[in-house]
Amino acid sequence: MPHPVYLIANGDLRLSANQKCWPAQAKAEQAVIAAVERLGATVKRGHEFNPQKNHGFIDSQKCGMEVFRQIPQDAPLMVVEAVWQYSHHLLHGLYTHKGPILTVANWSGQWPGLVGMLNLNGSLTKAGVKYSSLWSVDFTDEAFLDGLKRWLAGEAIVHDTSHAHPLENFTLPAVAETIGADLAATLQRDKAIMGVFDEGCMGMYNAIIPDELLHKTGVFKERLSQSALYAEMQRATDEEATAVRHWLDQKGMRFLTGTDEETELTDAQIHEQCKMYIAALRIADDFGCDTIGIQYQQGLKDLAPASDLAEGLLNNVDRPPVKHAQLPQILFEGEALPHFNEVDECAGLDGLITYRVWRKLGFDPENTLHDLRFGEDYQGKFVWVFEISGAVPPQHLIDGYAGTTSERQPPMYFRLGGGTVKGISKPGEIVWSRIFVDNGVLKADLGCAEVIALPQEETERRWADTTPQWPIMHAVTYGVSRDQMMARHKSNHIQVAYAPDADGANLALAAKAAMFRNLGMEVTICGTNHGL
C-alpha cells in the first residue's frame, strides 16, 4: 500500500456539541486505529486536534476543504464516526477522492455515530460516490475485522441485502393496485405543494430531492424562509398562544417546567412554541401547502425555542384549533398537516403519500419520521430504538396526549430550549419506508414491523443510552436484521405509520408501493410478513 490509511472525523457545526461528544469520538478512533495496526497497516490522521476549540472534528465545509487539500487523492480513506455529523462538511472532498473510501461507525446510541454514518452513506449514494461501510460495538468482533482486512486488501465490502426484493417480483392485490393508481393519478393531475422552510438542514444532502425528480410525482416546492416563520410568530397574539397551551393542558399533556431558561423548560419557551405552531399553519394556508418542513437547526435556533412541539402537533389530526388571522375559518380543520422533521424532503414526499393512502383506507393517517437511532437484542429479538427529537404525533404514543410529556431539549443542541413531544410508542403493526435518491433515480424501500412493549426499566435504560427527552419506538423489523438494515438503508431517517392490524398493514404497504411505482419510483419490498 503506497500510502498510509488516512483517518478523518466529521462533526457538528455547533461547538458545544463537538466539545461534549469528542471523548466518545477519541475512544472510537483509538479502537479503529488499533484494529488497523493489528492488520499490518498504518494510520495517519488527516487533521489534528484543535486545542483552541477543544475537539478534533471537521466542523465546517471550509474546514473540510482545507483538510482534503492535504490528503493524497489516491490514499485509502476512512471516515470514522461516533457522533452525528454534517455531511456537507466533507462531501466535496469525497466527490473527487480517487482512493478507496470506508465509512465506519461505532454501534452506540449515545451521540450517535451510526446515525451520522447512515446520513453520510445516503448522501454518497445520492452523489454516485463509491464507498464501503462497517460498524461495530468495540471494533474487535470477527465481522468488523474480516471486513476491515478485505478493505485494506483493496476489496469493496459487500453486505448481505437478500432481504430486499424488487416490487416487480410480487403480485399486488387488485384493491391495492386500484388505490395506488387512482391516488397517483390524482396527485399528478391536481398537483401538491411542499412547503420547504430553508433547505439542507444539518448538511443532509440526501434529504434534498432535486426538483426535476420531485416534479414527476406531481409535487412542487414552495421555498419559504424561516425568517418569514419567525415574523409570523411575532404576529400571533399572546391570547392565541395561551389558548393552544390551555387546549394541551386540558388534553392531559404534561410539561415538565422550571424557571432556569438555560437548563430547564419554561412556560415562556412553550408559549413561543405555541406561536410557532400557529404561524406554521397560517403560512401553510397562505401558500396552499399540503405538507411542510421546518429546518430549525440553522438560523431559527438562534431566534426561537425548538420547533418539535409545533411539528408533533401538526402531524396529529386531533390538535389545537387555529383560525385564519383575519377570517373565522379553522385552518385544516379535522386534518393533520404532515410535517417533515429537519426539512427532510424525502420524508416529506413519503409523509404526504402515506397520509393520502391511509386516509383512503380509513386508517389513522398520522405518520412521522424517526432516526434509526440504535438497537440491541432483547430476549432473543433485535429491537430497534426509533427515536427523533420530538416531532412525533401524540396519536402514536401510549395514551395519546395523556401519555405525552414535554421536556426541555438538551442545551448542547438547543440553546434556547423548547419542549419535546415525549412518550412511548404504542404496541401495534406499522409500515416503515424510505424514499431516497440514488445517482439520479428516485427510489423507495418499504417493509412491515411490529412495535412492541418493553418493561419500563428496559425502556428507561434505552432512553438513558440515547436521549431521554425524546419519544421512543421499540420496533422489530420483520425479516430484516440489524446488519441488513444498515447495509441497505440510505438515510438516518425512517418513516413509520400504524395500521389497525397485520392484514391492514399488508394492504397499506401494497397500496403505498403501488402509488410509489405509479409516481415513477423504483420500489423495493424489504423483509417478510408483508403478505405478498
Image (spheres, helix red, strand yellow):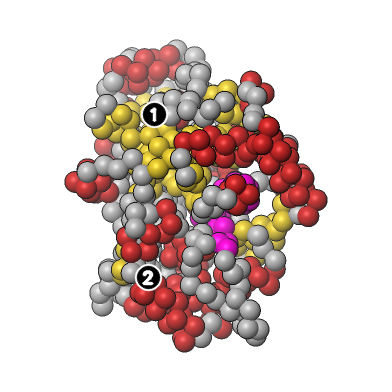
Task: Tell us which disc is closer to us: 1 or 2.
Answer: 2
Amino acid at dot 1? Arg
Q: Is residue 303 above or below residue 528?
A: below
Residue 37 located left or right of residue 331: left
Which element type, helix, strand or loop, lies under badge 1?
helix
**Label disc, if present, on residue 251 of the rendered structure:** 2
Quadrant position of residue 138: top left
Q: What is the x, y in percent for residue 210? A: 69, 46
408 vs 274, nearest the viewer: 274
* Residue reaching furthest to the left: 457
Q: How many other residues sit within 10 Å of disc 2, few (<14), some (14-19) or many (≥20)?
A: some
Residue 70: in magenta span: no
Q: Is residue 412 above or below residue 257?
A: above
Residue 141: quadrant of the picture: top left
The percent coordinates of residue 46 (x first, y second) are 42, 35
Q: Whole-Å distance between the Cαs marked 1 and 2?
A: 38 Å
> Between disc 1 and disc 2, whose residue precedes?
2
